Amino acid sequence: MAKRKSKKKQQNTIPWQLIVIASIGAITYYFTTNVDVTLYALIGSAVFLFVASIWKKVRSQQSLQRSNIHQIDDMTGIQFEEFLVQLFMKQGYRATMTKSSGDFGADLVLKGNGETIVVQAKRYKSSVGVKAVQEIIAAIRMYDADSAWVVTNSYFTKQAQTLASHNDVRLIDRDELLEMIQNTRRRK
């Protein structure tokens, strides 16, 4: 299995933006030696980078919302988690991603209707085995959750289905995920 990139590493975009803003300020001051012009350049570049980052995030969310099952198959694990956050939020849940390491078996935590649900997200090319169910069972107590789900773009092994049914874990396979996506789109 491929090693997961840390979410922190993927979201850490501030340093390069600060370098760009500082460089613009330094270059502007070097050529103008005017503090006012430099200040305007700094503010303008900060506003531009802020708007650009919001635009990029909105475009990314729109792309995730338009995803079909074949696009999901090509996603990374973290992109799949982000997609599920958007999907569950459209269903009325407050959805948050857990940190990538030390997540105690849960990738997402959903809250809604007075209930807390822990979710293990598995974007696999093959069937999801019993390990994912074991991990989410452990997460129930760690997150003081009321229920647990395992969601995949694939299917589950018989052993995973048996363990899940004995522990009241909801398994959402490829077919049910596609149905959830279609139902969410119809509600728009």
Image: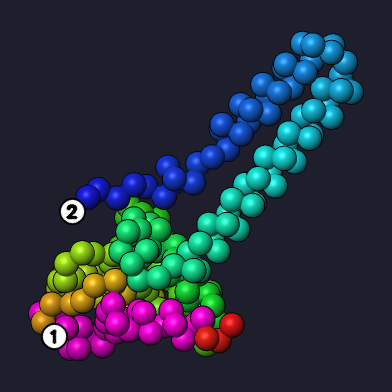
Q: Residue at x 40, y 78 (%)?
A: 117
Question: In the image shown, does 154 or 104 lie closer to the viewer?
Answer: 154
Residue highlighted by disc 2 = 1
Image coordinates of residue 132 in percent, x first then y, are 21, 69
Residue 118, x across and y down, in percent: 37, 74
Asked if one can make out residue 52 in the rendered structure from this viewpoint, the answer is yes
Query: From mark 2 to mark 1, how far is it between C-alphas?
Result: 24 Å
Q: Which residues are magenta?
A: 159-185
SS for dot 2:
loop
Looking at the image, the residue that sits furthest to the left is 159
Q: Is residue 163 magenta?
A: yes
Q: Residue at x 57, y 57 (%)?
A: 59
Q: At label 2, which amino acid type do we have?
A: Met
Residue drawn 72% across and 16% down? 27
Residue type indicated by callout 1: Thr
Q: Is residue 85 left or right of residue 57?
A: left
Q: Is residue 22 magenta?
A: no
Quick one: label 2, few (<14), some, or many (20+) residues within 10 Å?
few
Q: Is residue 49 above or below residue 79?
A: above
Q: Earlier in the sequence, mark 2 or mark 1?
A: 2
Q: Say which of 72 and 1 sits in front.
A: 72
Q: Nearer the viewer, residue 114 or 95?
A: 95
Secondary structure under badge 1?
Answer: helix
Spot occupied by residue 31 in the image (x, y as percentages of width and height): 79, 11
Residue appearing at x 23%, y 64% in the figure: 124
Q: Residues within 10 Å of mark 1 (few under 14, many from 20)?
A: some
User: Is 179 placed left or right of 152 in the picture?
Assistant: right
